[in-house]
Image (tube, coloured by chain):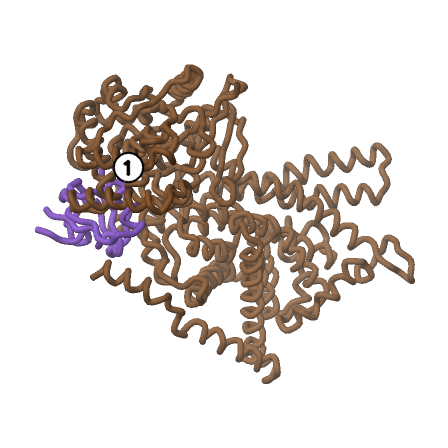
């Protein structure tokens, strides 16, 4: 018979590390039904029929956050055979709060007392035998980071399930509360299962909405319950939920007193670091220095070295010539050799050239995350982001998005409030990702003589787009209201572990590599075919003149749309549309279409802008910059659109996000080009200028109008809180 | 002395006296360990936002949240 172990615990208690320890690579990742909360399942190493379900990290089983609801529904509905509850030994008091709730559910519980290495280092002593007696369940010491005890804990859980063991909660609340719970048990006796009795009694006492919904109690019973609850509330002078919370903490305090001896007093090392790193004067300078190093190393030094190696040596000297000589050797047709060497190997290879750089960036961001600094960055940035309607937690997706938008969008999951999360998803891809940098480098190098300001201006445009969008969207009905108050647990600082950092880097980087292998592979073939074939004199065949190709005919249809932006020819239209496949394709496509000798993407990476004159001559400085702005801001590549769709979990919202981004990009480029023409004296006042002026007025109105205000009922409740 | 957590000097332990509001936020604060009678210590402040030590964990709080927690010293 298969056994299911549910892995439950607080956020930051080492749950993910233990899950990885226990299952190895044998994992399936999906979503919990109907929500974008990640669901991970895996088979326990060495046990074919034991499945471990990783529950979301939660602090309590109240019904307020998505994660809590998902966990509750799972535990009640699916009834796993045993719960393996991870408890962080270094802050055992808060962690046991969840434990007291888990033991009430009628499911056997085994506790893995984690982070024992830190507990011992701090000089604290925990009497696990006594703890086990007082909590009513087996306690096993573990240190998931060092891979100590995890397997023993899992095996204890399996044994518990096989023996059909039971966990009876040992904590007792004060007399008036226990009496009321007994009374509730009697009143609702016919409606609740015996094994869940304690759980439902407590939930009914708390007037838990979800529990009331699921039980469908008759009116008379409800009235009786209400009477019992109210009389207890009056006796203890507090609301029922707070009563239970306090009772739980009181019970825990007794347990702690009996079995934990704390050595230290005063500030811990982690707190001392925080006093410097999040100091009101030093926080921002320290943050700036850290970020400078992260980008300097990933872009300029190590990353550059690795990119050079991948492009020049790996693909340039080893793979491409080897493939070509092999194909020639077996007597392959010329066109097929062309397709494979130039189209596939060239196209995919140029994209893979970014991978090392991106992996180095992710490696460092993962190290920052694992050591605990990333959570502080969210705290530091919160004040600044709050001004335009986003929370500090929105900063992390954007930081990751500067490498690749896909993991960036996925990182928005940590934002609890729906509104804030949607807005973050919509604006994250405004930050230039690694794949957009070649476009920036091409325009800067080939059209602006390598001017220093072009690359920073791309980031500036991205940030400005986020700020403008934040302000505009916040004033609409959809997004009105303050960003959720910032509350976030900060993990203790610790040295990043190699295992965690590498795993995190791979999880983020792999989506990009997968993209290179699938979408980009197909599109490389598509571009090669459509640009090499066409109709000449009514017959279909290979063409020498690219103007006669199928690609040109497709492009000509789209081109007029871009005319007011300054790049209304089929070549740039095709390049822009191909940017949807992958942004670096914009450069590659321009190179192919304008017949640049060699691979345009590689030339840009090498900085050989002299050889890109064939592209440059088709642009003016103004139209090139307009082209750049449009491509930076418009809908992201398909991979990122897919990520938006997954995270929004709603087709309407996905289309809204992509539509907004594209309209925003179009209007910004429109204004830039039309006003640019006027101010540089290249053209006089025209209809285009007039339309641009109207757009500008609309934007100013959207920015400065009085925003939508939520219904007064809600405002009142906020007022009373602050009064 | 009784005051909102935002005014509590950093580094000095205080005791929670009251948590305002009867909404989800209050529950969330409670599950994080902010309970009446429990100790809290402000670790650092940045423009009104706080990092607080409560039950051996560090929690970052925005100003609007911290001002709901009334402490005495």
For the residue pair B63 and A101, the one nearer the viewer reads as A101
User: Can residue A703 be seen by looking at this rendering?
Assistant: yes
Shown colour of chain B = purple
* Percent of width and height locating residue A302: 49, 40
Q: Residue at x 74, y 56 (%)?
A: A595
Q: Residue at x 57, y 82 (%)?
A: A690
Identify the residue under disc 1.
Answer: A184
* Percent of width and height locating residue A308: 58, 42
Compared to residue A217, the image places residue A672 above or below, namely below
Q: Which type of secondary structure does the marked residue at label 1 adopt?
A: helix
* Location of residue A175 by image quarter: top left
* Percent of width and height locating residue B51: 25, 46
Q: Residue at x 44, y 40 (%)?
A: A70
Compared to residue A655, the image places residue A568 above or below, namely below
* Percent of width and height locating residue A153: 38, 20
Write down which chain is painted brown. Answer: A
């Amino acid at each position: 018979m298969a056994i299911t172990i549910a892995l439950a615990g607080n956020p930051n208690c080492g749950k993910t590390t233990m899950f990885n320890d226990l299952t190895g690579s044998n994992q399936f990742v999906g979503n919990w039904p109907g929500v974008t909360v990640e669901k991970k399942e895996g088979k326990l190493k060495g046990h074919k029929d034991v499945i471990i379900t990783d529950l979301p990290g939660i602090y309590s089983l109240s019904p307020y956050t998505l994660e809590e609801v998902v966990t509750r529904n799972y535990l009640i509905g699916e009834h796993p055979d045993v719960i393996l509850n991870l408890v962080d030994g270094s802050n055992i008091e808060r962690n046991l709060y969840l434990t007291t709730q888990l033991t009430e559910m009628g499911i056997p519980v085994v506790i893995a007392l984690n982070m024992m290495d830190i507990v011992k280092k701090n000089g604290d002593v925990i009497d696990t035998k006594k703890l086990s007696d007082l909590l009513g369940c087996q306690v096993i010491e573990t240190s998931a980071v060092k891979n100590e005890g995890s397997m023993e804990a899992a095996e204890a859980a399996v044994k518990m399930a096989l023996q059909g063991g039971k966990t009876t909660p040992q904590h007792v609340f004060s007399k008036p509360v226990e009496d009321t719970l007994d009374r509730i048990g009697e009143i609702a006796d016919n409606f609740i299962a015996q094994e869940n009795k304690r759980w439902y009694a407590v939930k009914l006492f708390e007037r838990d909405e979800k529990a009331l919904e699921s039980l469908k109690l008759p009116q008379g019973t409800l009235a009786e319950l209400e009477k019992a609850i109210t009389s207890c509330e009056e006796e203890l002078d507090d609301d029922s939920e707070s009563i239970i919370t306090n009772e739980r903490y009181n019970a825990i305090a007794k347990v702690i007193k009996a079995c934990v001896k704390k050595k230290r007093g005063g500030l811990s090392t982690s707190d001392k670091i925080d006093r410097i790193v999040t100091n009101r004067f030093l926080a921002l300078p320290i943050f700036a220095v850290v970020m400078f190093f992260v980008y300097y190393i990933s872009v300029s030094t190590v990353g550059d070295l690795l990119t050079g190696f991948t492009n020049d040596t790996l693909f340039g000297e080893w793979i491409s010539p080897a493939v070509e000589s092999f194909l020639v050797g077996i007597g392959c047709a010329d066109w097929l050799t062309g397709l494979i060497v130039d189209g596939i190997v060239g196209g995919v290879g140029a994209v893979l050239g970014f991978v090392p750089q991106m992996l180095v960036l992710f490696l460092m961001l993962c190290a920052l995350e694992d050591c605990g600094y990333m959570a502080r960055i969210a705290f530091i940035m919160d004040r600044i982001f709050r001004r335009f309607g986003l929370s500090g937690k929105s900063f992390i997706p954007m930081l990751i998005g500067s490498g690749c938008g896909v993991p960036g969008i996925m990182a928005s999951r940590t934002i609890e409030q729906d509104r804030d999360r949607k807005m973050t998803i919509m604006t994250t891809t405004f930050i230039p990702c690694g794949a957009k940098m070649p476009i920036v480098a091409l325009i800067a190098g080939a059209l602006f003589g390598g001017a220093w300001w072009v690359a920073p201006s791309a980031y500036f445009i991205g940030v400005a787009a986020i700020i403008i969008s934040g302000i505009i969207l916040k004033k609409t009905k959809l997004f009105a209201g303050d960003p959720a108050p910032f509350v976030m647990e900060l993990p203790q600082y610790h040295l990043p572990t190699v295992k965690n950092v590498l795993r995190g880097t791979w999880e983020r980087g792999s989506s990009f590599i997968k993209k290179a292998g699938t979408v980009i592979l197909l599109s490389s073939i598509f571009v090669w075919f459509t640009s090499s074939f066409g109709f000449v004199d009514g017959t279909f065949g290979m063409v020498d003149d690219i103007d006669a190709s199928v690609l040109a005919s497709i492009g000509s249809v789209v081109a007029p749309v871009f005319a007011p932006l300054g790049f209304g020819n089929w070549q740039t239209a095709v390049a822009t549309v191909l940017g949807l496949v992958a942004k670096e394709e914009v450069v590659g496509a321009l190179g192919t279409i304008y017949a640049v000798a060699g691979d345009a993407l590689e030339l840009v990476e090498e900085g050989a802008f002299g050889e890109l004159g064939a592209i440059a001559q088709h642009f003016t400085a103004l139209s090139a910059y307009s082209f750049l702005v449009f491509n930076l801001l418009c809908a992201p590549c398909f991979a990122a659109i897919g990520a938006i769709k997954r995270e929004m979990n709603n087709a309407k919202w996905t289309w809204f996000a992509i539509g907004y981004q594209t309209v925003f990009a179009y209007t910004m480029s429109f204004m830039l080009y039309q006003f640019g023409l006027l101010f540089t004296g290249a053209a006089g006042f025209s209809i285009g200028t007039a339309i641009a002026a109207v757009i500008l007025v609309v934007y100013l109105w959207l920015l400065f109008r009085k925003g939508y205000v939520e219904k007064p009922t809600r405002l009142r409740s906020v007022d009373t809180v602050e009064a | 002395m009784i005051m909102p957590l935002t005014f509590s000097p950093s580094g000095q332990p205080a005791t929670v006296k009251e948590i305002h509001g009867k909404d989800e936020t209050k529950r969330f604060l409670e599950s994080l360990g902010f309970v009446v009678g429990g100790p809290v210590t402000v670790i650092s402040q940045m423009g009104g936002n706080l990092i607080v030590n409560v039950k051996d964990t560090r929690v970052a709080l925005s100003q609007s949240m911290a001002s709901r927690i009334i402490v005495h010293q």
